[in-house]
Image (tube, grey):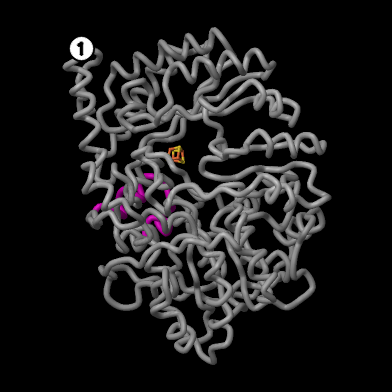
Amino acid sequence: MPRSRRPARRRTSGRGRTGDVAAERLRRETGTLARDVRAHVCLAYPSPYRVGMSSLGFQTIYRTLNEAGLWTHRAFLPDEWDKHALAWPRPPADIRTYEGRRPPADHRVLAVSVAYELEIAGLVRLLEGARIPVLARDRGEHDPVVVIGGPLTFSNPYPLLPFADVLVLGEAEHLVGDLVDDLLRAATRSAALAAAEGRPHMLLGELGAPFRGDLPDVGKAPRTWLPARSAIVTPDTELADMYLVEPERGCSRPCTFCVMRRSTNGGMRWFDAEEVLATIPEHARRVGLVGAAVTDHPQLEALVSGIVDSGRRIGISSLRADRLTPRLLSLLHRGGYRQITVASDGISERMRTMLDRRIREEHLRTAAERVAAAGFAGLKVYEMIGAPGETEEDVDELIEFARELASIVRLTLTFSTFVPKRNTPLDGAPFVGVETSAARLRRIREALSGQVTLRPQSPKWAHVEYLLARAGSEGGHAAVAAVHAGGGYRAWLKAFERVAEVGRPIRYGDEEAWARRKGLAALRVPDRIVRRREAGSNGPPRAS
Ligand code: SF4
């Protein structure tokens, strides 16, 4: 197993272009906390500022720690360290915190939030750029305690184990304050790790032999800690000048590919519209409603109208096609929306049924008609290529249906390639393959050229995501090798040549009981298709 070398500490001024950019961004922020104090905690994000500051989870932990008096500053991957394409060795400038202009290594605790598998490459670069030994086992008494959490821990936290001194699983806002407080009180690094050991929803990372034990349960924040909301509003993010608030957490639906499905952490928890509206600060001119299933909020129209009627603009992280009423669309139009985005995911009626997506052709058609009637510039639909059982006939259906939608409204289709995730019923399903996915995308592009705008994501990076999604802690070590080999697709393939898939049982929530009662959805769904076929309504599912 590769071991990382302790990077040599180098003196750098911390000024120059990166420092200037940070100072300028700080100047444009509203709501910055702990600006003029010396912080003992560095909260870092393994992607650039514009991505990290758009993460409500990252903003929530920043606010939570500072409100508890645990002064926390922020660090990000420099803009130019693109997560896929950075040549190795990395650029010479060190990473510094935004507020304090200090190296993250000078802090007692480094907390990192990782959203999904491909950000593990950013994590490696972040630690190297922060002059902190990448692997937990190489750290010494004077290194910060590295605490890692974030959305990836709901699915497959194993590849994070080599990097974490302490890994926090699931929701963390109610856990992180006490944890950090105890870490800061400990006299030595070993005492800090001892203080973290055995806490609920946490484990020490890979210190010694590869970790193979059972994972603790994921954390679930009590309602008193919610709704999550951002501290800082800035024009320099993907969601420019937007205050973020989470009117609901989780989802009560059963989509078989989705980590946020109903069994992961107890379904949807929602908050009264008045309670959510009361959190919006006076200075916020744009409000983003963030959550897995915001349009399932039972008071959605009251919530949206409360924001729009106050003269603010609005953004919603997820819109369901079957929840787009004319009134909601009218409110969204008044709130600044120019294009409506919904998800289909399955590329045909059969695939949506296979995935338990519960969005049907008629919902998408009606959504297109209403979007056009309400005067929006267009409709964007998320599609997912390569889910289990997808065939060329499904691609034919997508093409035909896309032409129909494009005759109603200006249409954009975005495509990802399906990656089976741990802690979902489709865990263990095959990856469709880069060639197959690319060929289907090519066919769709040729068929819809000039009629539909297409935005495909790279199947190669979906493949890398797949390799990490099914890996154990060895996947983290392979990620270090891949980044050091340049971080290109071939480097990842080579690094994973010897990494075996590590199976583990479905783990979180009541998924296991659900599977016992119903049978795994991945197995159950083909039965349903077979029944439909016997009734003469559809063709057989075929492995692609
Ligand atoms: S895809 Fe959306 S609707 Fe389906 S389970 Fe996930 S969050 Fe819920």
Q: Position of residue 85 (x, y in %)?
A: 49, 47
Q: Position of residue 210 (x, y in %)?
A: 28, 71
Can you say whether 459 is above or below 110 in the image?
above
Q: Is residue 453 left or right of residue 267?
A: right
Q: Name the residue located 32 percent from the left edge and 63 percent from the top edge.
A: 473
Q: Which residue is mark 1?
A: 536
Can you say whether 219 is above or below 47 in the image?
below
Give the amino acid type for the residue marked by disc 1 in the picture: Gly
The stretch in magenta equals 481-498
Out of 274 and 291, give the one closest to the viewer: 274
Q: Name the residue located 47 percent from the left edge and 89 percent from the top edge.
A: 191
Q: Name the residue located 37 percent from the left edge and 64 percent from the top edge.
A: 217
Q: Position of residue 426 (x, y in %)?
A: 29, 42
Q: Name the residue located 54 percent from the left edge and 21 percent from the top edge.
A: 412
Predominant SS along the magenta part: helix
Q: Is residue 346 left or right of residue 237?
A: left
Q: Is 510 one of the magenta-colored residues?
A: no
Residue, far bottom? 187
Quadrant hosting residue 202: bottom left
Callout 1: helix, strand or loop? loop
